[in-house]
Image (cartoon, coloured by chain):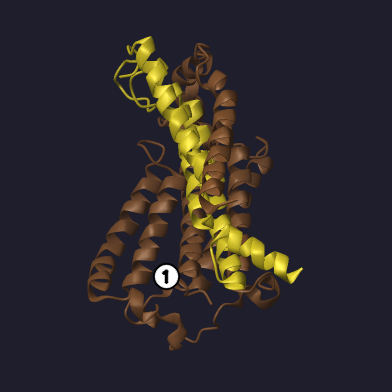
Chain colours: A yellow, B brown
Amino acid sequence: MHSHVGQGEVVLERILILLLFLIGFAGIVGMRNIIKKIFGLTIINSAVVLLFIVEGSRIGNSAPIIDAEIGLVVDPVPQALMLTAIVIGVCVTALALALAFRLYKAYGSFDIDEIHRQVHRES
Amino acid sequence: MSGRARRILFLAQIALCVLLVAAVLIPVFLSSMPWPLSARDYLQANGLAESGASNLVSAIYLGYRAFDTLGETIVLLVAISGTIAIIAHGGAVLAQGYGLPSGTASEPARHLPPKTRTELLEVVTGKLGPVVLVFGVYVMMYGHLSPGGGFQGGVVIASGIVFLALGSRVDASNSLTSPENLVRIESAAFALLLLAASSGIISGSGFFGNPLAGAGLTPVAFIITLNAIIGLKVGAGLGFMCIAMLGRGK
């Protein structure tokens, strides 16, 4: 499926994935709402997973499941690695959401500036 | 400084940040290294014979890199404990034995808040939950043959548990979605995983070695066992976390 794409398409795919990564990063840096920052983290995670899966799929053209058909399978190693990355991503998201929940209970806001102001007022 | 100027300055800072990260990442993304073929070639030639799983991803994460999977499940366990600790009682959870309700099924606090309970939600999720559970078990048990495996099946099982929790009108009728039982399943599955991993030591094939290697059974039996244990653990753990986030685990 991917084994005969041209060099231009490869570069285009990588640039799109890079843009996805940068969108997530801009969300983390630029958003004031903590929940949106966590969304940004999730988008970065997805971009990395996509990069590995897409790159690993270039050397074959069928799923890495051995059966009767003869053909080159895609590289299963990045897929197994990304299985780990997805699980860790879920863990990170859950912990971050729980921390956001605690912050909201403590300060009544998801806005990072508002929380900052209140922390300063307390100290 | 006026509010508008500060806004523009803020946007400029974000743009600078993103540009700098892009400058760091562009060489990584646009490098023209050829993808190495050796791992794929070796696995396609020998993976099925060595591990018994025709799904090579399963063969890797339960065969060649099973130790890494053990670490991954520990990370999942720690994340779930941490999330529950942060959400429920701010750190004092372990001292209170997870602070879970002790068998008081008629307690009104264990129902969902009225805002989130609608007829439509109850009917749809209540009917769909068992189907999703069955599909999760299928994905879990056939992970060595088809796309799927312990983690994927476990996540589907967790969503089935969440469906059942959303759809249950009477709380006591549904012991699968009670946090106590989910915690028990999670702990038992982790103990089983350690036991299964250590069982290879007794037969002399090492930690995470296949204890059935010389018994005439196909080596895939070990992978199915590990898939089932990991699926139970992930399903119970994630389901517990989701139910705690729904507000039922308090």
Q: Is residue B213 visible?
A: no
| Residue B206 falls in image quadrant | top right
Q: Residues within 10 Å of mark 1 (few under 14, many from 20)?
A: some
- Name which residue lies at 45% across and 17% down: B45
| Residue B78 falls in image quadrant | bottom right
- Name which residue lies at 46% across and 63% down: B242
- Between residues B67 and A23, which one lies in front from this camera angle? A23
Residue B221 in the figure: left or right of residue B9: left
B49 lies above or below B90: above
- Between residues A105 and B174, which one lies in front from this camera angle? A105
Residue under label 1:
B176
| Quarter containing the C terminus of chain A | bottom right
Residue B159: x percent and y percent? 38, 58
B154 lies above or below A66: below
Residue B145: x percent and y percent? 37, 36
Residue most extreme to the front: B1
A57 lies above or below A88: above
Q: State how many labels appear.
A: 1
| Amino acid type of the residue tagged 1 in the rendering | Leu
Q: Secondary structure at mark 1?
A: helix
- Between residues B20 and B117, which one lies in front from this camera angle? B20
Q: Is residue B236 visible?
A: yes
Residue B212 in the figure: left or right of residue B55: right
Residue A22: x percent and y percent? 49, 34
- Name which residue lies at 49% across and 58% down: B238
Residue B35 in the figure: left or right of residue B82: left
Residue B140 in the figure: left or right of residue B196: left
The residue marked by circle 1 belongs to what chain? Answer: B
